[in-house]
Image (cartoon, rainbow, N blue to C red):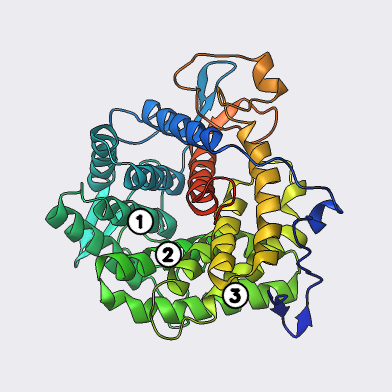
Amino acid sequence: MVRAPLVAGRVLAVVATGAISIARGGVADPPRIPADVLDRAIALNLEFMLNNQKEAGNFTYEYDFVRRREIGGDSSVRQAGALWGLSLIHLRGPSDRTAAAIRRGMAFFERAGVVRDGRRLIRYPGEDEVKTGCIALAALALIDFSRSGAAPAEECRMQLGQYLEFLVSLRGPDGLFHGTARPGDGLGDGGPSPYSDGEALLALVKAAKYLGMTRYRDMALASAEAMHAEHVVAALKRDPDSDQTKGFYQWGSMAFYELATSGWADVDRCASRVIDLAHWMIDVHRTLERARNTGYAYEGIAHAWELARLAGDRVAMAKFESVIQRGLGRLLSWQVGGPLQNGYLRFHPTQDTRAVGGVMNGAADPVLRIDVTQHQAHATILVRDFLYRDPGTGL
């Protein structure tokens, strides 16, 4: 039986109620999304990302598909996240085309990099500070590209080690990370952020777990405890629907999942943390009632479903799947050219290769942002790979 999450001595009003989503007041389960719909959505996500990669290696940040024009603005963190998204898709189904795109993206960040004392920082064009999240996500892209076997091993390992050493240099004695650093000397100068803390944690955990870089394991374990205490326990004590916890949510869930399945010592608590966070996302943050794209929520809930499966907790599995089917099903209807297009998209049909496969941030928002598509693509992959092992049962 799944435990309700304990927050500063109080039990949140979270009850696993089987296949009925309590966040929707007892609405019956939706039809199961067909596996081929998920496969088609992922394939279109990939086409969108490839078609929006620029010659330099970075990506179109925002594109208004109705007006057929790029929107101003950029973000180093979201650009690195898009590269990581490509690496995840490539890891699932390697191809020469995606490998070439990843190498082009790696070269872009390498050109923006500066190495000091064995630490590589990224001075992203147009930004006046180094973003910890950008370094962490560039590292994650290298980690998962390396796992595919298609990466140039020696070059990749050296660059990855330099990114990780820079991250470690931003880690404070409390186990949290500076959110930014000065571009001149690379010294941390920003307070911790729930986003970049979770991104850095995930990078350290995956490097140790999948690439044998065990130097980072104990640091990751200590930081996981510190981050859970600050971004979950303390944050929810201050505000039961904390923006801080929401920022940490998917990154913390992914990192705790990797720890829970690592086979390392002292990780027994990690599985229940992922499951507890999923209950919080559903019942307190009420993800099904959000008007904007919540692909990030399903990155976490899919991992919680898998850990519930490993624990044999069918009640939690049924609850999480009900929410996934309803919530992800709605988000899939926001994909341009996708198999489940909503009324707005049917009213604005397009064959524009820069738009098809992209995902809107709202039900009628024509601006396609690269990170929205990346998070939804990752969530769709996780759902497809975890819940659909045996079509029709997910078991």
**Label 3: which residue?**
272
**Closer-to-camera residue (357/391):** 391
**Closer-to-camera residue (182/89):** 89
**Closer-to-camera residue (103/6):** 6
**Label 1: which residue?**
140
21 sits left or right of 136 in the view: right
Disc 2 and disc 1 in contact, CB within 8 angstroms: yes
Q: Farthest residue to the left: give it.
A: 154
Please identify the quarter of the rendering in which residue 344 is found: top right
**Label 2: which residue?**
202
Q: Is residue 289 visible?
A: yes
Q: How crowded is mark 2: few (under 14 residues within 10 Å), some or many (20 or more)?
A: many
User: Residue 61 location in percent, x, y?
Assistant: 47, 34
Q: Quadrant of the C terminus?
A: bottom right
Q: Residues within 10 Å of mark 3 (few under 14, many from 20)?
A: many
Give the alpha-carbon distance from disc 3 to disc 1, as whole Å: 24 Å
First in sequence: mark 3 or mark 1? 1
Residue type at tag 1: Leu
98 sits left or right of 39 in the view: left
Q: Which residue is drawn at 32% across and 63% down?
A: 186
Residue 279's disc number: none
Disc 3 and disc 1 in contact, CB within 8 angstroms: no
